Amino acid sequence: EMEDDEIPMDVILKACKRMRPSDRQLVKKAIDQISYTVFSSATLDDIKRVDGLGLNLKNIESNRGLRRSLFLPSDISTTDIVPTDVLCQYLDRLDTIWDFGTEMARRSKIDAIIAEAIATSGLPFRTYCEVKNDWSGPGFSYKGNVDYMIGAGDQVESFLLVVEAKKEFPDSSVAQVLAEAGCLLRNRQAVGKSTPVFAILTNAVNFQFYAIDTNSVVYTSGVSIMLSPANDKKYHTSQSLVEILRWMKWFITSMACISPACSQEDAETRSDIVKSAVIEVTKCFQDSA
């Protein structure tokens, strides 16, 4: 709960736009002196703090993170997912010539899979890399860039999906990706966009999927999916690749349903459509037992 003399950061930032340049610089200097936690240093205890993101981790803690609380809808069938020859041949080639000992090297696979998922969706989303996603709470704030953010525009509040590429999987990276997604949720809510957000944590071998609803409850796909070629050492018949693309297809389809930018309707109709879509999407969010 905020003290009487505390002002939310989003209110301060909006007020800055109406200030003289000299006054704006003074405020900027004061903001820069605020203590921030970088995403890579975030812990699960941090992201639960009520004076910060206040995320509800009941489906993540006490080993529940291995239990599924996020479910694919039945209409996202494996038979609908056919990886393109371009993707499969590229992954085959990488496995032959690439050393994956560094995070940068692993991103080559992640780049290809994200590009496949978006390009084959036919939806107007773009991927941005190293996106600033700072957010300040009344007592605990975050600062840093996100590896990948995907959405229908180039502003933070236009994104709906974060992807964190992390060689160390999962270890501390779970808290990091949830901090990044939580800040995205809060940045969207600050401009009146009340929808769930999505997140993917991967080291290019293991893929784990998350969602955070508008009540700040975190949901997970459970045990990570391990990407590997089929028995013939090729990706054309890799079931793990199909399963990863299934999850990404659902995330991207859901994003299109709840993103006003993807609708051609008038504002009032668009708002009603988004509300209905959020209800439908969150039917796949179920607390783990």
Image (cartoon, rainbow, N blue to C red):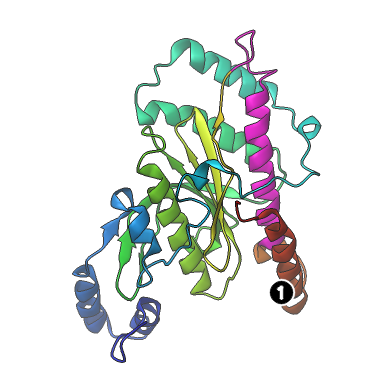
Q: Can residue 143 be seen in this view?
A: yes
Main SS of residues in magenta: helix
Q: Residue 102: horizontal and vertical position, in percent?
A: 34, 26
Which residue sits furthest bottom?
A: 4
Q: Which residue is drawn at 36% across and 39% down?
A: 171
Judge whether residue 109 is colored magenta.
Answer: no
Q: Residue at x 66, y 32 (%)?
A: 243
Q: Residue 16: horizontal and vertical position, in percent?
A: 33, 81
Which secondary structure, mark 1? Answer: helix
**What's the magenta region?**
229-258
Residue with the mark numbered 1? 271
Give residue 138's quadrant in the image: bottom left
Above or below residue 208? Residue 156 is below
Q: Is residue 43 left or right of residue 273?
A: left
Foreground residue among 84 and 288: 288
Foreground residue among 87 and 20: 87
Give residue 11's quadrant in the image: bottom left
Q: Is residue 148 left or right of residue 229?
A: left
Q: Is residue 130 visible?
A: no
Q: Residue 224: horizontal and vertical position, in percent?
A: 54, 35
Give the residue type that dot 1 points to. Ser
Q: In this view, does 22 lie to the left or right of 11?
A: left
Judge whether residue 237 is colored magenta.
Answer: yes
